[in-house]
Image (spheres, helix red, strand yellow):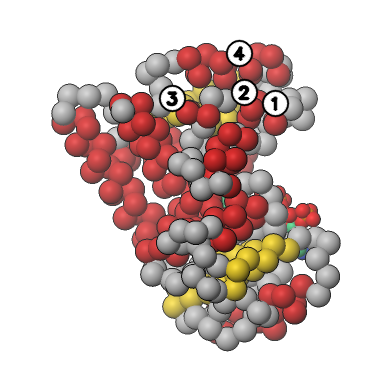
Amino acid sequence: MKIIDGKLISTQLKEEIAKKVKHIVEKGKRPPHLAVIIVGEDGGSQVYVNNKIKACQLVGIKSTHIELPVETTENELLKRVYDLNNNTELDGFIVQLPLPKHINEQKIIEAISPEKDVDGFTPINIGKMVIGLDAYVPATPFGITELLRRYKIETAGKKVVVLGRSNIVGRPISILMSQKSDIGNATVTVCHSKTPDLMKITNQADILIAAIGVPEFVTADMVKKGVVIIDVGTTRVKSDQTKSGWKLKGDVKFDEVAEKAGLITPVPGGVGPMTIASLLYNTLLAYKKKQL
Ligand code: NAP
């Protein structure tokens, strides 16, 4: 078994982005600029946003952090989104999810200009991705394809099983893996909570991508020997071994599955670090597109 080291690959990706940003600034141009809107004080979201801002600083991307109170109305948030859409000094922005319950997330996502949608969540970007046009690929699926690419994992002709069909992970990664592209050309099966005989399906996978959010769901008897495991799941579970009182668990029972797998991503340190690096990549892409 070999570990797919997402920390290492994300560091490489960030170094490549930093080099490109340095080159831009050396030519006397402004650096790429990302804004992040967060509404309310959800603890997990605050941590994610702070990590995104820190990552921007690390690679030289300018960042603007917009914190709005939990009582912000849907119309007030829409106005902020329109302002950012029209801000010519801004290349991309994201609205951190989840939003407070009184705000319709889909309405907000659809208000984001597709040119600035570096999360790749707008219907226009998703539609473009589906038919293989140039689009911002959502960060986590992009991160997964980058891990597969950089570890030179063959996907053409392979059987890929994706557990989960969410709009941000399962659905887009299943589309990417079936596309006619270097990381793609696979035969893909998408499973969800209504899929019967799951074990029979997972046992056929050459590559298993688990994105369900159920800690340690995938056990050794569910996979065949030599399988490549991409574990997207990150669930906080209580732990008396850490200072914080919790730790992150993936969707895969790591110790026993690792013994059978050819390659496997750990949690933490696998897919997670790639997600932020991919957002930076999309921001640089948005900047470059604006310069054309
Ligand atoms: P989600 O929106 O809750 O979707 C979960 C999907 O898993 C659904 O399609 C659901 O089926 C399916 N599912 C749930 N239980 C199942 C079961 N027992 N058997 C088969 N399918 C099952 O989740 P998400 O947003 O995609 O996130 C999934 C996990 O990835 C979470 O742990 C999340 O924290 C993590 N995540 C990590 C990153 C990262 O950067 N590492 C990024 C995004 C998400 P139904 O559709 O039938 O309900």
Decide which of tag 4 and tag 3 comes sooner along the chain: 3
In this view of the protein, which residue sits in the foreground, 117 or 216?
A: 117
Circles 1 and 2: CB distance less than 8 Å? Answer: yes
In this view of the protein, which residue sits in the foreground, 250 or 31?
A: 31
The residue to which callout 1 is attached is 107
- Amino acid type of the residue that numbered disc 1 sits on in the rendered structure: Lys
Give the percent coordinates (x, y) of residue 52.
46, 39
Q: Which mark is residue 79?
A: 4
Q: CA distance from mark 2 to mark 3?
A: 19 Å
Q: Secondary structure at mark 3?
A: strand
Q: CA distance from mark 2 to mark 4?
A: 10 Å
Q: Is residue 140 placed above or below 209 in the rendered structure?
A: above
Q: Is residue 57 placed above or below 211 in the rendered structure?
A: above
Task: Choose mark 4 or mark 3, whichever is in front.
Answer: 4
> Would the CB of label 2 be found within 8 Å of ligand 1?
no
Residue drawn at x 33%, y 33% is: 288
Decide which of tag 3 and tag 1 comes sooner along the chain: 3
- Amino acid type of the residue that numbered disc 3 sits on in the rendered structure: Thr
Task: Choose mark 4 or mark 1, whichever is in front.
Answer: 1
Decide which of tag 4 and tag 1 comes sooner along the chain: 4
Residue density around tag 2, few if under 14, some if 14–19, many if 20 or more, within 10 Å: some
Give the percent coordinates (x, y) of residue 47.
54, 41
Decide which of tag 2 and tag 3 comes sooner along the chain: 3
Q: Secondary structure at mark 1?
A: helix
Give the percent coordinates (x, y) of residue 194.
83, 62
- Does the image show residue 251? no
- Amino acid type of the residue that numbered disc 2 sits on in the rendered structure: Ala
Residue drawn at x 75%, y 79% is: 200
The residue to which callout 3 is attached is 64
